[in-house]
Amino acid sequence: MGNLEDTIAAISTGTGGAVSIIRISGSDSLAIGNSIWHGALKLSPRNRRKAILGKCTSRNPLFSEQAIAIFYQAPHSYTGDDVVEIQCHGGALVTRKVLEIALMAGARQAAPGEFTFRAFMNGKLDLTQAEAVCDIISAQSSMALNLAERQAAGILGRNVHEIRSLLVNVLSECESRMDFGEENLDWQSPKKLISTIDKASEGISALLKYRTEGAVLREGVRVVIAGKPNVGKSSLLNLLLGYDRAIVTSLPGTTRDTVEELASIRNIPVRLIDTAGIREADNIIENKGIERSLASIKQAQIILWLLDVSANPTAEIKTLNEHASGKENVIAVWNKTDLLAKSAKLPATGIETVKISIEERSGIDELMDHIEKMIWGYPHASEPETAVSSRHAALLVEALEAVPGAVEKIRSQEWELASVNLRAAISALGRITGEDASPDILDEIFSRFCIGK
């Protein structure tokens, strides 16, 4: 990540909106702001946090654009530095022109995530909060957004810091015993130290319970809709999306390629994938589509295998068994139950099964229940308080694995060896919040951000 001395600038809003924001951050931001923007009042500490109307101007190239400017004085800004934000019309060209004259006035183009990196380095955010900024931008469901906002407010960081503090207190006791072992100080008993470590372990284990939620809400779930031609795959895709995305006809083989769309099912971000019908085809284009369908089935986290109740049930189940037999991630979905006689019985599929009618919109809630249960693996009645990422989970596991060794050494009063294990656990937890994070880790995390954040 770039140095902290440069004054940096970037467009901080997406293209296409009514208003764009160009953010300038660093020690020279006020001087640069006043050199490219002019209003009835000058930007200054006296006028900090005031939205002032004026114009961005430049002689070379000749440019003039009406804009609002706001000065945020350090440390009371997003980055912790002096910051000037210029709000102009949202056209792509005019926005780039304002950024261009800011760069010509002495600012450097900000790297991806560099504003948030500075906020982290200036103590405005811990590393979990900085990561949450990225999660907020990429959230694909309201549950994912709510969790990201709670993490941005510091809930995960505070939990980790509290656990780390418990272990630091035990470590200080162990090191005191090494340094002042001959003195008659008021030591805590090994039993009490172990009790403190056990409390820290319980806290780590409690956070690890939410690793599944973290993976699901950040990465989403690949849900493939598969089956023979004309069983209703594209109709189900359209129904789950809430709009017509795939073409639906009565002709077999209408879908010749996979169709992918993002959706939210029970507040879970999913990537729905409609596939070409599985059958023997003599058309080279359809065959290519079927090959892609089979590849998608192999990569799916959940497979909704549609079966047609109006077709030959034995043939339907045979196709299911040929391509999805033995898979734990398959839900058999009998469709067109509106065509089924009340007295008719369907053969067992041997896997999770649900009956629906896309035509009559029946059974869809039950199908979603099955999907939700398969994703979480257990009842999920309420929204979790937090959800750790794969990075957090790996470090929590590392800390948890170091703890038993410390307990064992404290029991035998081998204080130096206990300290080694405690330091390992404390370091792992510190890498979650950023207290012990290396420059390489920071670069890797902040490089995931878009420019302007």
Image (cartoon, grey):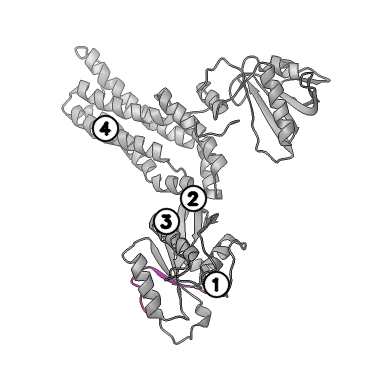
Q: Main secondary structure of the magenta part?
A: loop
Residue 73 as seen in the image, left or right of residue 69: left
The crowding category of the residue bearing disc 4, from other C-alpha atoms within 10 Å (few below 14, some 14 to 19, many at least 20), is some
Secondary structure under tag 1 reads loop
Q: Earlier in the sequence, mark 3 or mark 2?
A: 3
Using the image, determine if residue 30 lies above or below residue 208. above
Using the numbered discs, state the Cα–Cα distance from disc 3 to disc 2 in whole angstroms: 14 Å
Q: Earlier in the sequence, mark 2 or mark 4?
A: 2
Figure quadrant of residue 319: bottom left
Using the numbered discs, state the Cα–Cα distance from disc 1 to disc 4 in whole angstroms: 53 Å
Q: What's the residue at 53%, 37% (across, down)?
A: 134
Closer mark to the observer between disc 1 and disc 4: 1
Q: Are marks 3 and 2 in contact (CB under 8 Å)?
A: no
Q: Which residue is mark 4?
A: 402
Name the amino acid type tagged 4.
Ala
Name the amino acid type tagged 1.
Ile
Using the numbered discs, state the Cα–Cα distance from disc 4 to disc 3 in whole angstroms: 31 Å
Closer mark to the observer between disc 3 and disc 1: 1
Q: Earlier in the sequence, mark 1 or mark 2?
A: 1
The crowding category of the residue bearing disc 1, from other C-alpha atoms within 10 Å (few below 14, some 14 to 19, many at least 20), is some
Q: Which residue is mark 1?
A: 358
Residue 303 as seen in the image, left or right of residue 365: left
